[in-house]
Image (cartoon, helix red, strand yellow):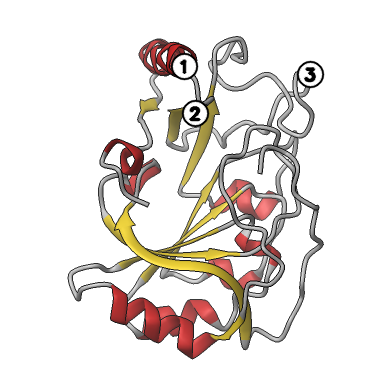
Amino acid sequence: MLGKNPVRKREPGDGTRLQVTEIFHSLQGEGPYAGRPALFIRLTGCNLRCWWCDTQWNDETDPYLPIEDIARTARDLAPATTALAVITGGEPVRQALHGLLPALHGHGFRAQIETAGTLWQDCLAAPYVDIVVSPKTPRIHPEIHDRARAFKYVTRVGDIGADGLPARATQAAGGKAAVARPRPGAPVYLSPCDEFDEARNRANRRAVAETALAHGYTAGVQLHKVFDLP
């Protein structure tokens, strides 16, 4: 999208249908479950516009699917040994998740929500849900800040503050506005920004390694790209 997507507002909905871009089985590439087989449900639309975003998730013709169809498709696509369902986007919390999460749980999945953290729903507090927040704005919802299992940051050369975390805005290229910081003591994961230029990407990977060594964060790469997976 590279910051060219339309900003889409929150859709309250009744939780019975969700607009879905794709459902697929792969490896989780980042964060606390990196390397773990996972069933991915990518929901359509986002309430933010990050200038470096490289994910396609905003086709307004994507279908609205019944919750039970989504959960059943998830179980059909993933072997029984896959117990993790990753709800991503776009911004998944933009749509009502109170129907999907228990449906997935009923099919044997634990859910991981990948969110920028600006929105909250009470269903995210369920014991079978893990929140992994990747802040993109200076402030995130206090419930997300308090409950997130982990904080994940995309790192690039020239965009690193004194604490080793991003120091520039994501909503306007080059703008000065540090993104929200992690909860004290919470795990922090770093991954290098993919700038579609190998020299820049190599420098970004090096920056992740050096920052993790200096600050005690966990360094990572987008494993699914390394293994040429979706």
Amino acid on which disc 1 is placed: Asn
Q: Position of residue 179 (x, y in %)?
A: 69, 30
Secondary-structure class at tag 2: loop
Q: Residues within 10 Å of mark 2 (few under 14, many from 20)?
A: many
Task: Name above or below for residue 42 compared with residue 145.
Answer: below
Give the alpha-carbon distance from disc 1 to disc 3, as whole Å: 19 Å
Q: For the N terminus, give its image quadrant.
A: top right
Q: Which mark is residue 176?
A: 3
Q: Which mark is residue 125?
A: none
Give the alpha-carbon distance from disc 1 to disc 2, as whole Å: 8 Å
User: Do the residues bearing badges 1 and 2 touch, measured as CB atoms within 8 Å?
Assistant: yes
Comparing 58 with 141, the one in front is 58
Amino acid on which disc 2 is placed: Asp
Task: Name above or below for residue 141 compared with residue 184.
Answer: below
Residue at 30% over, 75% down: 77
User: Label 1: which residue?
Assistant: 204
Give the alpha-carbon distance from disc 3 to disc 2, as whole Å: 20 Å
Q: Earlier in the sequence, mark 1 or mark 2?
A: 2
User: Label 2: which residue?
Assistant: 194
Q: Position of residue 40 (x, y in %)?
A: 41, 63
Q: Position of residue 214 (x, y in %)?
A: 41, 10
Amino acid on which disc 3 is placed: Lys
Residue at 31% over, 57% down: 26
Horizontal side, residue 157 vs residue 220: left or right: right
